[in-house]
Image (tube, grey):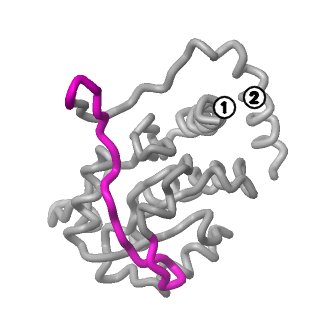
Amino acid sequence: MPRFQSLLLAAALASLAACQQRELPILGHSQVVDGQTVHHSIPEFAFLNQDSVWVTRDQYRGKVYVADFFFTTCTTICPVMKSQMKRVYEAYAGDDRVRFLSHTINPRHDRPYVLQAEARRLGAEAPAWNFVTGEKDSLYQIAKSYLALALEDSTAVDGLIHSGSFMLIDPLGRVRGSYLGTDSAEVDQLILDIALLLEQEG
């Protein structure tokens, strides 16, 4: 693990005692059913990953994970996002409690072999970090569940628009945070918040 990430994790763990009163928010719409609050959560899904293996919601139950949306031909924010996501991935390398899930929004181009090349470039391995593709409508719909944006737009630079956020998901599938993936300070906070969430859920 790079020294910076080690120091950052050490700082996070050292400050957990002082943060016991702090609770990460639960984002999204909640409703009361039979007197109990039911929070928004990620629905069932099934996508193909970079190894042409099906990835489902079941594989993320009980895990803290970070999700994002991108496409490999993106010339704007995606390269920065991926370098920042790699930092988070490396910070938790070897910790099976933490996983990563990157969804392409250009499935016509980003087939499994293309995603595999991207994963190799970043040093990412499944199941710790899955790069997934599927039907366009399913990918765009699941983005809404993550409180993110993904759509085609002929006026955009690359013809596609997506949120530049990393979403932090808890073991129950609830969205607990959204962090700008192009902002190193926000990504630092994400690394800290993963440690906090692990401590609170553990």
Q: The residue tagged with tag 2: helix, strand or loop?
A: helix
**Is 39 left, or right, of 23 in this rendering?**
left
x and y, in percent, of residue 67 in the image: 45, 53
Is 5 located above or below residue 158 in the figure?
A: above
Seen in the image, is 116 located left or right of residue 156?
right
Quadrant of the drawing holding the C terminus: top right
Q: Which residue is mark 1?
A: 199
- Dividing the picture into quadrants, the one containing residue 36 is top left
Residue 31: x, y in percent?
21, 30
Callout 1: SS: helix
Please check the rendered image and state whether residue 42 is part of the magenta-colored stretch, yes or no.
Answer: yes
Q: Say which residue appears at 81% left-offset and 50% top-offset.
A: 2
Single out the mark in the foreground, 1 or 2.
1
Instruction: Give me the residue at 25% from left, 51% from top.
Output: 144
Q: What amino acid type should be assigned to the residue bearing mark 1?
A: Glu
- Type of the residue with mark 2: Leu
Mark linked to residue 83:
none
Q: Residue at x 63, y 16 (%)?
A: 20
Label 2 environment density (alpha carbons within 10 Å; few <14, some 14–19, many ≥20): some
In the foreground, 190 or 152: 190
Image spot of residue 119 (x, y percent): 58, 73
Residue 171 placement, left or right of 34: right
Q: Is residue 182 visible?
A: no
- Residue located beneath label 2 in the image: 13
Farthest residue, direction right = 3
Q: Quadrant of residue 54?
A: bottom left
Residue nearest the observer in this picture, 33 or 31: 33
**Residue 95 vs residue 185, the one in the foreground:** 95
Cβ–Cβ under 8 Å for marks 1 and 2:
yes
Q: Is residue 6 above or below residue 59?
A: above
Cα distance in 3D space between marks 1 and 2: 9 Å
Start and end of the magenta stretch? 32-55
